[in-house]
Amino acid sequence: NRWCSEGVDLLAAPPVERCTTIGAAESALAQVETFLGEGMALRLGNPKEFRSQFDTVMSPDVTVRVQQVLQRIEDVRSMCDKRRHSLKTFIEKPSRPVQAVSPAPHQS
Protein backbone atom coordinates (compact mmCIF):
# COMPACT_ATOMS: atom_id res chain seq x y z
CA ASN A 1 0.00 0.00 0.00
CA ARG A 2 2.85 2.39 0.81
CA TRP A 3 4.46 1.68 -2.58
CA CYS A 4 1.14 2.37 -4.31
CA SER A 5 0.67 5.64 -2.42
CA GLU A 6 4.15 6.78 -3.43
CA GLY A 7 3.32 5.88 -7.03
CA VAL A 8 0.13 7.91 -6.96
CA ASP A 9 2.11 10.87 -5.60
CA LEU A 10 4.70 10.46 -8.34
CA LEU A 11 2.01 10.28 -11.01
CA ALA A 12 0.33 13.39 -9.59
CA ALA A 13 3.39 15.37 -10.70
CA PRO A 14 2.92 17.58 -13.74
CA PRO A 15 1.97 15.57 -16.83
CA VAL A 16 4.29 15.01 -19.77
CA GLU A 17 2.59 17.81 -21.70
CA ARG A 18 4.00 20.26 -19.17
CA CYS A 19 7.61 19.10 -19.63
CA THR A 20 9.18 21.98 -21.48
CA THR A 21 12.70 20.61 -21.76
CA ILE A 22 14.29 17.28 -22.53
CA GLY A 23 16.15 17.55 -19.21
CA ALA A 24 12.90 17.80 -17.24
CA ALA A 25 11.46 14.82 -19.11
CA GLU A 26 14.63 12.79 -18.54
CA SER A 27 14.50 13.59 -14.83
CA ALA A 28 10.84 12.56 -14.62
CA LEU A 29 11.63 9.36 -16.55
CA ALA A 30 14.45 8.52 -14.15
CA GLN A 31 12.08 8.98 -11.20
CA VAL A 32 9.47 6.66 -12.74
CA GLU A 33 12.08 4.02 -13.57
CA THR A 34 13.57 4.21 -10.07
CA PHE A 35 10.10 3.84 -8.58
CA LEU A 36 9.34 0.79 -10.74
CA GLY A 37 12.71 -0.68 -9.76
CA GLU A 38 11.79 -0.30 -6.10
CA GLY A 39 8.63 -2.29 -6.81
CA MET A 40 10.73 -5.08 -8.26
CA ALA A 41 13.00 -4.99 -5.19
CA LEU A 42 9.89 -5.47 -3.04
CA ARG A 43 9.09 -8.50 -5.22
CA LEU A 44 6.01 -6.88 -6.62
CA GLY A 45 6.97 -7.94 -10.13
CA ASN A 46 4.42 -10.73 -10.34
CA PRO A 47 1.42 -10.18 -8.05
CA LYS A 48 -0.12 -13.55 -8.91
CA GLU A 49 3.06 -15.32 -7.82
CA PHE A 50 3.08 -13.24 -4.62
CA ARG A 51 -0.51 -14.24 -3.89
CA SER A 52 0.07 -17.91 -4.62
CA GLN A 53 2.90 -18.03 -2.06
CA PHE A 54 0.54 -17.04 0.74
CA ASP A 55 -2.80 -18.30 -0.56
CA THR A 56 -2.85 -21.38 1.66
CA VAL A 57 -2.30 -19.45 4.91
CA MET A 58 -4.67 -16.52 4.34
CA SER A 59 -8.15 -16.30 5.76
CA PRO A 60 -10.98 -15.34 3.38
CA ASP A 61 -11.02 -11.78 4.78
CA VAL A 62 -7.30 -11.38 4.26
CA THR A 63 -7.56 -12.91 0.79
CA VAL A 64 -10.07 -10.22 -0.25
CA ARG A 65 -7.82 -7.47 1.12
CA VAL A 66 -4.77 -8.92 -0.64
CA GLN A 67 -6.68 -9.08 -3.92
CA GLN A 68 -7.56 -5.40 -3.56
CA VAL A 69 -3.95 -4.47 -2.88
CA LEU A 70 -2.71 -6.57 -5.80
CA GLN A 71 -5.19 -4.87 -8.10
CA ARG A 72 -3.98 -1.49 -6.87
CA ILE A 73 -0.38 -2.55 -7.55
CA GLU A 74 -1.33 -3.52 -11.10
CA ASP A 75 -3.16 -0.21 -11.62
CA VAL A 76 -0.21 1.87 -10.39
CA ARG A 77 2.26 -0.17 -12.44
CA SER A 78 0.11 0.26 -15.55
CA MET A 79 -0.13 4.03 -15.07
CA CYS A 80 3.64 4.24 -14.50
CA ASP A 81 4.28 2.25 -17.67
CA LYS A 82 2.07 4.65 -19.62
CA ARG A 83 3.86 7.66 -18.13
CA ARG A 84 7.23 6.10 -18.92
CA HIS A 85 6.15 5.50 -22.53
CA SER A 86 4.93 9.10 -22.88
CA LEU A 87 8.16 10.48 -21.45
CA LYS A 88 10.29 8.32 -23.74
CA THR A 89 8.22 9.46 -26.73
CA PHE A 90 8.73 13.10 -25.72
CA ILE A 91 12.47 12.62 -25.24
CA GLU A 92 12.96 10.72 -28.49
CA LYS A 93 10.77 13.02 -30.58
CA PRO A 94 13.06 14.76 -33.05
CA SER A 95 13.04 18.49 -32.67
CA ARG A 96 11.87 20.41 -35.67
CA PRO A 97 14.35 22.89 -37.05
CA VAL A 98 13.21 26.46 -36.91
CA GLN A 99 13.31 28.12 -40.30
CA ALA A 100 14.02 31.83 -40.36
CA VAL A 101 11.46 33.76 -42.35
CA SER A 102 12.07 37.28 -43.61
CA PRO A 103 9.24 39.73 -43.12
CA ALA A 104 7.28 40.56 -46.23
CA PRO A 105 8.12 43.97 -47.69
CA HIS A 106 5.69 46.66 -46.68
CA GLN A 107 3.54 47.81 -49.62
CA SER A 108 1.95 51.25 -49.54
Image: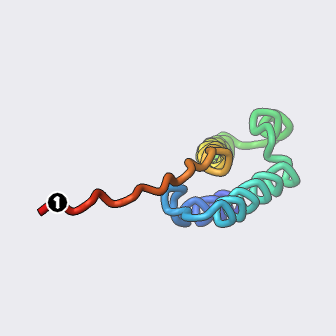
Q: Whole-percent x and y of residue 103?
A: 33, 60
Q: Whole-percent x and y of residue 8?
A: 58, 60
Q: Whole-percent x and y of residue 72?
A: 61, 47
Question: Is residue 70 rendered to the left or right of residue 19?
Answer: right
Question: Is residue 107 rendered to the left or right of residue 37?
Answer: left
Which residue was labeled with disc 1? Answer: 107
Question: Is residue 87 rendered to the left or right of residue 41?
Answer: left
Residue 9: quadrant of the picture? bottom right
Query: Is residue 105 visible to us here?
Result: yes
**Quadrant in which the C terminus appears:** bottom left
Residue 33: quadrant of the picture? bottom right
The amino acid sitting under disc 1 is: Gln
- Binning the other alpha carbons within 10 Å of mark 1 as few (below 14), some (14 to 19) or many (20 upward) gives few
Q: Whole-percent x and y of residue 77?
A: 67, 46
SS at circle 1? loop
**Quadrant in which the N terminus appears:** bottom right
Applied colour scheme: rainbow
Residue 21: quadrant of the picture? bottom right
Taking depth in this image into account, of 3 and 92 the one nearest to the observer is 92
Q: Is residue 31 above or below residue 45?
A: below
Residue that appears at 76% across and 43% down = 58
Query: Is residue 68 visible to us here?
Result: no
Residue that appears at 58% across and 59% down = 11
Residue that appears at 65% across and 60% down = 22
Taking depth in this image into account, of 28 and 68 the one nearest to the observer is 28
Label total for image: 1
Residue at the outermost left position: 108
Residue that appears at 54% across and 56% down = 16
